[in-house]
Amino acid sequence: MVSRRALLQRAVVAAGALVFLRRAPTAQAASGQEADAPRPTHTPRWGMVIDLDKCTSCQACVVACWAENNQPLPGPEAHRAGRVIEWMKLLSVHEGSYPRVRQRLLPIPCQQCDQPPCTTVCPVFATYKNPEGLVAQIYPRCIGCRYCVNACPYTCKFFNWSEARWPASMAQELNPDVSVRPKGVTEKCTFCHHRLQRAKEQAASEGRVLQAGDYVPACMQACPAQAIVFGDLNDPASDVSKAQDNPRRFRLQEELGTEPKVTYLSEA
Amino acid sequence: MEQPRDIASDIVTPMIRWPRGYGVFVGCLLAVIAFAAYAWTQQLRFGLGVTGLTRPVFWGLYITNFVFFIGISHAGTLISAILRLCRAEWRRPITRMAEAITVLVLFIGAGNVIMDLGRPDRALNVILHPNFRSPLLWDITSITTYLTASMLYLYLPLIPDLAILRDRLPRRRWFYRPLALGWTGTPQQHRRLERAIAIMAVVVIPIAISVHTVVSWVFAMTIQPMWHSTIFGPYFVAGAIFSGIAALIVAMAILRKVYHLEAYLKPIHFNNLGILLLVMACLWLYFTFAEYLTTFYGHQPEEMAVFWTKITGPFAPYFWAMAVCCFVIPVILLGIPRLRTISGTVAASGFILIGMWLERFLIVVPSLINPRLPFPGGVYHPSWVELAITAGAFATFLLFYCLFIKVFPIISIWEVQEGQERGVDETVERLKTYLPTAVSQPPQPATSRFQTKWS
Ligand code: SF4
Ligand code: SF4
C-alpha cells in the first residue's frame, strides 16, 4: 500500500520529468547544431542595424524578402482588405503638421526582441526564442489563435487568412529552403533562419566554424544603399557591433523593455 | 383555507407537454443553426479570410462573444452559490434556472474560441504542448475547472428531483433511474446531499471569480494600449456578474410566461434581483469611470489614441450606447421603486445585455485598431460569416436551454417543497437568533442609560 504522500511525490516527479523531456528535444532542434561540426567559441546573438540616413526607401528589401521567404504576392484585393503579408515592411511616419510635414519611411522587420512579449503568450510553444536569440515560429504546431500577433507591440506578425497563391508562372520559383505556410497559421520575419542553417551545413562540410559573412539575410543582400548591417552582436569585432556603437542609434519603442535586436541609426 | 400547491405536478406537467409553439421555436432555432453551420463550413474551407478581420484587427466578433458568454456564465453558479450560502429563502425557485445557464453557456463561450482559431483541427495542441506561461492556457484550465464544478453543482441538487421524475414519469424511467443514484430521501441521504451542496457552493465561488479574471488577463497581460490595465480582473468579474444577473432575469421572465410559473416566480423575485442588478450597475459605472479617468490623466499618446477612438471617434456611437444601456436606463428602471416591476426589470436586463456585449466589443476592437506603432487604416467590418456564426451561437444556447427544460425540472422541486414545509419555521428560528438575547438579570443602570442615549 502506497501512502498518499508518497503517491503525490511520485506524481510530481513524474510530471516534472515529463515537462523536462518534452522541452529537451525542442531546445536541441532549435540550436540546430551539427554533432560533428567544430564548435564555435561562443553562442552568437544575431542582430541588425538599419541606417536610416542611408536608406532611400527603395523597397528592395521588401521585394527581396517576398521572394526569399515565399510570401504570397499581394494583389489589389489583399491591399483593400488590409491583409498584405510583408515580413519586411516600410512604415511611414509623419512628423510635424502642415505646412511643415515630413514623411519618413522606416524599414521594419520583426525586431527579434530579446524579451519578446509575443512568445510568452503562445499557448502551444509555437513561437519561442531560440538560444541564438532568433524568435522562431513553428508552423505545423500553431493553432492560429493570433494571440502572439496581438501581443507584439510592433505589429510584426502576419496571419495567413487564406491559402497562399502565386501566379502560375511564379509557382515554380518558390524558394525550396522555405516552407510554404498553410492557411490559418501565423508567420513573421525569421532573419532568414534557413540561410543560417545552410551556412552552418556549408561550414560543417568544409570543417570550419561559421564565419562573419557566411550568414546574411536576403534584405541586407538586396539593399543597394548598404543601409542594413547584420551579424553577431555577441562578437564585439563584428560589423554589426561596430555599426551599433554609434551616437545616432535608437531602437523602436525602447521604453517597452522588449530589448529589440534591430537598431536604427538616424541623425534626426 | 388555502391549499398548498402540488409543486411536483406544477413543474413536471409542462415538461411533458409539447405545445405547437415549442416546435415552431425549436424549428426556427435549428434553421439559424443550420445557416451558421453553413457559414462555418465556408470558413473552414477558405480560412479566416471570409471574416472581416484584417491586420491589425486580428480579433473581432468571436472573441467578443467568447468574453460575453463566459460573462453570462456567472449568472448561475456564482449567484446561486452566494444566495445559498446567505440562506436567502427567495432563491429556491431560481437557483436551478441560473445554474443551467452557467453550464450551457460555457459550451457556447468555448465554442466561439474554436471558431476563432485559424487551425481548429489542431486545438488539441493546447493539451499536447501546453505553455503554462500563456494566459490562454490559464483560461483553458480555469474554464474546464469551472465547467466541471458547475456541472457537479447543477447535478447535486438535481438528484432528489430526478428521483421524483423517476417515480412520476414511467416512460422516461430508463433515463432518470441511473441518474437518480437510488435516491429514496432518507434523512441520512438528505444530510449528505446538503453537506455536498454546501461544500460545492463554497468551492465554486473562487473558481467562478478566477474564470473571468483570467479571461481579462488574456488582454491585460499584453502591453497593448488600454488592455494593459491592473483593474481588468475585477472590472471583468463585475461586468460578468452584471450581465449574468441580467440574463437570469430574462430567462426567468420567459420561463414564467411559457411554463405558467406565476405562482413561483413572483414580483418579489424580480424585485430582489433588480436591486442586485442596480448595485452591479453602479459598480460597473465605478469601474468604467476609474478605468477611463486613469487613462485620460496618464495621457500616453498610444492610450489616448484608443481613448478618443471610443469617446469621440468612429466607435463613439457604440460607446455612448453602451453607457446608456448599462447605466442610464437600468438606473432609471431599477432605481425608481414604482418602475421596478417585472416588465421594468426585464427591460433593464435586455438593455444591459446589449450594453455588456457592446462593452466587450469596445474592449477588443478599438485597442487593435490603434496599435502602438503608427498604422494606416485599421478598420473592421464583420462579414456575414461572423454575423451568421454569432447568431448561431445565440441560437445554440437557446436550443440547449429549450432541451434542458424538457428533460430536467427547471425549478428545484424538493427545495421549493422544503421551503414550503420548513422554510418559514427555520427562518423564524434564525431571526430569533439575531434578536438581542433575552434579559435574565437587570443590567447596570449606567450602561443602560448610555445605550438608550446612543444606540
Ligand atoms: S518584434 Fe514582435 S514578433 Fe518580433 S520578437 Fe518582438 S514581439 Fe515578437
Ligand atoms: S497564433 Fe500560433 S504562434 Fe501565435 S500564439 Fe497562437 S498558436 Fe502561438
Image: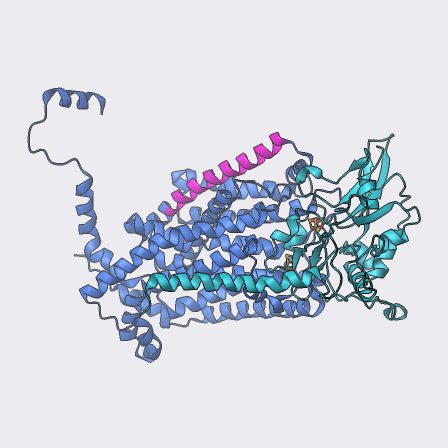
Residue B331, percent from left and from top: 46, 39
Residue B375 lies left or right of residue B135; in this view the side is right
Residue B34, relative to residue A142: is it above or below? below
> In this view of the protein, can residue B249 be seen by the observer?
no
In the rendered structure, does residue B292 fall within the stretch colored magenta?
yes
Residue B352, percent from left and from top: 50, 47
Residue B311, relative to residue B428: is it above or below? above
Residue B6 lies left or right of residue B155; in this view the side is left
- Foreground residue, B87 or B245? B87
Magenta stretch: give its range. B273-298
Q: Residue at x 85, y 47 (%)?
A: A228
Residue B162, relative to residue B202: is it above or below? below
Residue B247, percent from left and from top: 46, 53
Q: Which image quarter holds the C terminus of chain A?
A: top right
Q: Which image quarter holds the N terminus of chain A?
A: bottom left
- Foreground residue, A221 or B91? A221
Quarter of the view holding residue B277: top left
In the rendered structure, does residue B202 fall within the stretch colored magenta?
no
View extreme (right): residue? A224
Q: Residue at x 18, y 37 (%)?
A: B435
Q: How many marks?
A: 0
State the cyan chain. Answer: A
> In this view of the protein, can residue B110 be seen by the observer?
yes
Residue B254, relative to residue B364: is it above or below? below
Residue B341, percent from left and from top: 39, 46
State the blue chain. Answer: B
Q: Residue at x 56, y 53 (%)?
A: B133
Is the stretch drawn in magenta largely helix, strand or loop? Answer: helix
